[in-house]
Amino acid sequence: MELVNHYVTPDEGLRFERFLDWLARRGRSSSTARSYRSDWQHLAMWYRRRYGQLFDATMLDAEVTAAWRETAEARGKSGATVSRRLAFARTYGAFLSQQGVLRRSTVDAIRERARQRRVDRGPRVLSAEDVNTLLRHVDERGCLRDQAAFYLLLDTGLKVSEVVALTVGDVDFGVGSLRVEGTRDRVVPLPTRAARKLAWSLVERGLLALPPSGELVLPASGGWPPDHLVEPPAVELVPRMAEVPHSPMPFGHEGPPASWPLLVGERGQLSANGLQRIVRKHCTFARVDATPQVLRHTFAFAYWQRTRDLVSLAEILGHETIESSRMYTQIAPEAAAPAARLAAAGGPTPARVG
């Protein structure tokens, strides 16, 4: 397995290759090795940014492990992610001890720090600055499909599984809404800026017909997060399905275009893993620490800050009761200011797309 990590010393790269061989001899699965490789790469990148030098395992100790953990917790990483990273630190420490790289006392101290309980900080939301940085990057570097995916996640609060399950017919540009089917079928508002990105991605696929003017006219939704819709424009101006022959769609999808997947990749309907990779790629390049779940939390908290309506928030998110949505009323005060500014900044958006 070829290892490429620009944040480690040459000796560390060779050492980690021996660690992977050590795991294989102990019967650990290939998926475990891939997870540990990802954790090692993240640790090295974090170490380089924090301490200003390349990572080498000789520098691994309890203090470094604790700081790495605290950074993950402060950024709202899930308990599963934090636990997996700590498991890697313990296992790598055991290997390093056998190799004579670390003292046994150092490894014992790492294990002790790893056993300390994680502090529950509640859901993490992005600041206004991070949202603007992320979307600016996606607008500049992302393809139309990637732009549509990001705006859908951030502007509707949908889960990854719900976004990839959407079909072309689930979109209603006339009133600005999405039909979401699943364990809790519902209709959620589709803000203008997300509708704009989605419409152009469908134009690129030849599934929306452009009016003679060459512009798309969409109903204004009153900004983000949505709290009301204005009257839709004239019916003849709303984007409509293009006249596409009912022949099989590439990738084996048959039937009318309305039944075709809303987001597609090179091999057909975009998968949940595919969408997660898209988010991870753009967040990495934009240097914004975010996941689809963080985007959902950001939408939900900004919606609550703007409307103070738990009932409608629970409906949009697909929660069975408002108790599941109540956590957004209890986010730490320091997160409220930037998220509230983000919500307040969402004024009426232009109705015309051109």
Image: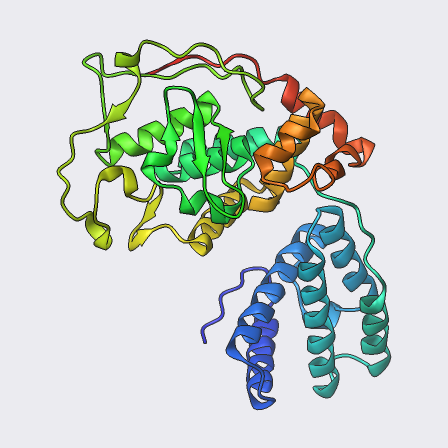
Percent of width and height locating residue 21: 55, 85
Residue 314 located left or right of residue 215? right
Q: How many numbered marks are there? A: 0
Residue at image coords 47%, 37%: 150
Residue at image coords 36%, 10%: 233
Percent of width and height locating residue 97: 75, 83
Quick one: 132 or 291, which is closer to the camera? Answer: 291
Q: Is 233 situated above or below 324?
A: above
Residue 34 located left or right of residue 69? left
Quadrant position of the N terminus in the picture: bottom left
Residue 90 falls in image quadrant: bottom right
Residue 245 falls in image quadrant: top left
Percent of width and height locating residue 120: 80, 50
Q: Is 218 situated above or below 268?
A: above
Residue 306 falls in image quadrant: top right
Quadrant position of the C terminus in the picture: top left
Residue at image coords 75%, 39%: 327
Q: Is 134 situated above or below 41?
A: above
Q: Residue furthest bottom?
A: 25
